[in-house]
Image (cartoon, grey):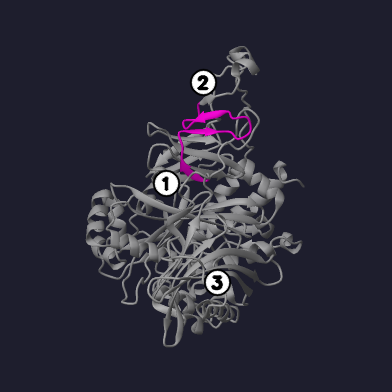
Amino acid sequence: MALAEPDGITEITGAVRQGLIPAYLYNDAEVHELERDRLFGRSWNFLAHESEIARPDDYVVRNIGDDSFLVTRDSDGVIHVMFNMCVHRGMQVCRAERGSARTFRCPYHAWTYKNDGQLAGLPFHADAYGGDTGFVKEGQALLAAPSVAVRNGMIFASLDPDAPDFETWLGDFAFYLDFYTGQSEAGMEFRGPQRWRVEANWKIGAENFMGDSYHTPHTHASVVDIELFGEPKPYKRKEGVLWHAGPGGGTTYKLPPGSDFRSGLAYVGYPDEMIDRMAAKLNPAQRALVDEPGFMPSASTLFPNLSFVHNWPQTDAEGRITPFISVRLWQPVGPGETEVYSWFCVAADAPDDYKAASYKAYLMCFGSSGMFEQDDVENWVSITTMARGSMARNLLLNNRMGLTLDGEPIVNQFEGFGGPGTAYQGFGEHNQRHWFSMWADLVSQAAPARQPMAFGMGEQPA
Amino acid sequence: MSSGRSGAPLPYTDGRHQMAAQFLTEEAHLLDTSDFEAWLGLMDPRIRYRMPVRVTAVKAADEVEVQTMHHFDEDWYSLRKRVQRFQTDYAWTEDPQSRIRHHVSNVRTFEGSGDELTVESAVLLYRSRGDRTAPSLLSAGRTDVLIPTSEGLRLRQRDIEIDESVLRTQNLAIFL
């Protein structure tokens, strides 16, 4: 039965809502197409951070699914997100991935666009088109992303013109987002991204960062063994709280007994001046999360494919502990292939020696060469390879940790947690099920209606 | 990539070039045979080992490498940790091990400052894992600073110019 048919998709969504994942979802062309059209066609997708286009005329080129977008800061400082396809014959207008430019000239016929997207130059407009009698140039521009939003300097876009209001959609996830990208009034500095392609399905990374504290003690045993990062010992990991709130969720580590906001942040390596800025920036409820009984955010995911990580490894031979933050995007490029974009991010006004140590912490742990990430990707490639065959169609993977057979939680929700949403202490796949319930919601809806637009045709309908 | 080199490359008949070329060949052998401890022994304790991220930029742009982001930016401590990790029983990404081969070529040796040598080379790393996934290739240029010691040459600095903006290998659980 075709998946796009209602009964076909209901069979899958029914299973995943019960915590049973048809294994082939991790490598299937039809599922990939449904996700592209229905899920990525409707969701809010992260593109870039404002600090990557810090100066007027800066730009980066980023993808949502197969679509290339120009993300620019125009000469007046205003941010634009535009489909990177010439409206004339469809050439990719900008083929560099970053730089600075006031205009973009299509290599094919030299149509030229200003960095706010407006069509500025059209060679032989009078001769070739009879001027506006053949092509109305005024007001024409590259196709804008249907919906754009900025939060903590992070630029998001949706391909859906009727996308839900970003802030409403983000909901209580915003509370947690600030721990990663709202640490200081000065904003954050994003560096990178490192980009690399892995033969793994994009969903696996998203789910893993959202709530898989269970894999840490085993998959990452080597980094504990070499005393790079002391926290992921099994007994420590299970004391952490798993939370989900709004369209995301994440993991935490429990801080040592007796910690408060300041000593908890100092324990993971933040210097006093950064703690002062966090104390000023975060609200009392956010500060209470770190206060006794303190929890420190670690990995998390904002649906669908944006993940965050905050760890605090040892960054020199003298035993200095330094935290780092990485933001990463799991960009699907095929049913069994993902392009990873991994940024290092740090408070823009952090001291230079902290920035250097935090950067080192990031490179050692995550990203293309990171010692945590290396072992993660090995697992994800293997899952994706196994999911390709016939037998995987007969296997429902168990995503029910933390539930009885009757569907009741094994432990009650954790009451002493300071943050909004739903929280459980100990191991469980609550967050992964939450992620898959959002996945199910979107893949069961039809893709947004297409609204083709013609250019240069004046006020007349095309 | 600044390396402090000067003048034309040394002739192939120059003993310093021959020592440098042999150093790179022997180093590649240590990596290909997973003798990471001996490999680490070739590093000067002040080693800087860097591989910046490269980007696709317009020809006129200065920025083809993002010097604020690297794939590797290592000192002796972090190289040591990477080597130690491979020696644990839990470095799953290299157990079973990849079959790897460093093909080193285009070696050009220059006089550096003092008795240092600056050595440029090309490296092609072939990496094959398991029996299900396709092998990967990494191509890079390297600029090394080698210093003579009583125990032979030691690597003081390596700047790696990777020939991809988007790597097509699952991770960098390797050294170039």
Q: Is residue A323 visible?
A: no
Q: Residue at x 42, y 37 (%)?
A: A57
| Residue A274 percent across, percent down from the top left | 26, 57
**Could you say which quadrant of the image residue B165 lies in?**
bottom right
Magenta-colored stretch includes residue B15: no
Query: Are the residues flagged by discs 2 and 1 from a single subunit?
Result: yes
The three-letter code of the residue at mark 3 reads Ile
Q: Residue at x 50, y 58 (%)?
A: A430
Q: Residue beneath label 2, please? A: A139
Q: Residue beneath label 3, please? A: B174
The three-letter code of the residue at mark 2 reads Gly
Mark 1 vs mark 3, CA separation in Å: 29 Å
The three-letter code of the residue at mark 1 reads Glu
Magenta-colored stretch includes residue A115: yes
The answer to whether the residues at label 2 and label 1 have Cβ atoms under 8 Å apart is no
Mark 2 vs mark 3, CA separation in Å: 52 Å
Query: Are the residues flagged by discs 1 and 3 from a single subunit?
Result: no
| Residue A388 percent across, percent down from the top left | 72, 60
Disc 3 element: loop
Mark 2 vs mark 1, CA separation in Å: 28 Å
